[in-house]
Amino acid sequence: MGAFDFEVIERSLRYLFFDGMAFTLKLTAMAALGGIFFGTLLAMMRLSSHKWLSRPATAYVNLMRSVPLLLVIFWFYFLVPFIGGWITGSGRPIQVGGFASSVITFIMFEAAYYSEIMRAGIQSIPRGQVWAGYALGLDYWQSMGNIVLPQAFRNMLPILLTQTIILFQDTSLVYVLSITDFLGAASKIAQRDGRLVEMYTFAALVYFVVSIALSYCVKRLQRRIAIVR
């Protein structure tokens, strides 16, 4: 440890957290909110009795869960601009950008995983509560929105947050697009100063501490929810 340069970490803290970690947290929040929203819609489609809704949703979820996230990132970033240009008839790739590409990619990918969590939450609610909603004059969407989904979210909240922690870790993959997330910022400093050991060790330690702290909070929340039940 005598050759370990702590000063390079100290000098880079502002850049690492104000630029890198800020982007990572922003991407995590946007992908989580979008993923939960579209994941809930996918879950309701999968549980629908209409095959024209359930089959496409099932195919989408199975596809996304069978493809590596890194491949989806590359596919969207490099291929979709050409597809967009072909659809619009412009003859040239449309400009998507690294940030928009990463946000859309993570929302698309995480929606498949959040949908399975929400599907389990919806199925955990007794079917009789839906029929009770019908008896009160509510239609299907009103029963889901006012009776089923609030309970499903409460039941699945710890698992949803656990998946969000995994999402926080997965956002480090955007460094392959040269985006300055936390790992990307650490990588740039490591390459610039030739201090790979220090920067990658520090980045791993930060991810470890944040993930452990969030996991502890999720466990406490899970105990409180269990007591309420």
Image: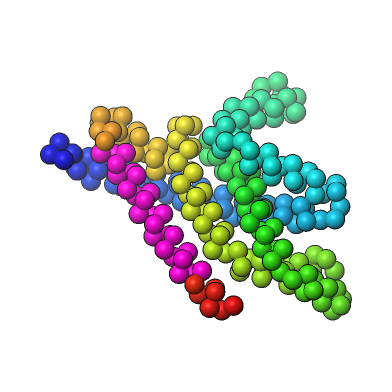
Placement of 224 over or under 197, stated as above or below: below
On the rendered structure, is 22 left or right of 93? left
The residue that appears at 66% across and 70% down in the rendered structure is 151
Q: Is residue 88 above or below residue 214?
A: above
Give the residue at x 74% y 71%: 126
Q: Nearer the viewer, residue 62 or 84?
A: 62
Q: Position of residue 220 (x, y in %)?
A: 45, 69
Q: Quadrant of the N terminus?
A: top left
Q: Position of residue 166 (x, y in %)?
A: 50, 50
Camera sees residue 129:
yes
Magenta residue span: 198-222
**Res. 100 in view:** no
**27 vs 176: above or below:** below
Residue 128, image quadrant: bottom right
Q: Return the x and y of residue 81 as percentages of the image width and height.
A: 64, 28
Q: Quadrant of the C terminus?
A: bottom right
Question: Looking at the image, what colour scheme do you see?
Answer: rainbow
Looking at the image, which is closer to me, 91 or 34? 34
Q: Residue at x 32, y 39 (%)?
A: 200
- Does the magenta segment cover residue 199? yes
Residue 178 or residue 223, whichever sits in front: 223
Name the main secondary structure of what is drawn in magenta.
helix
- Using residue 213 as the reference point, say whether residue 195 is left or right of it: left
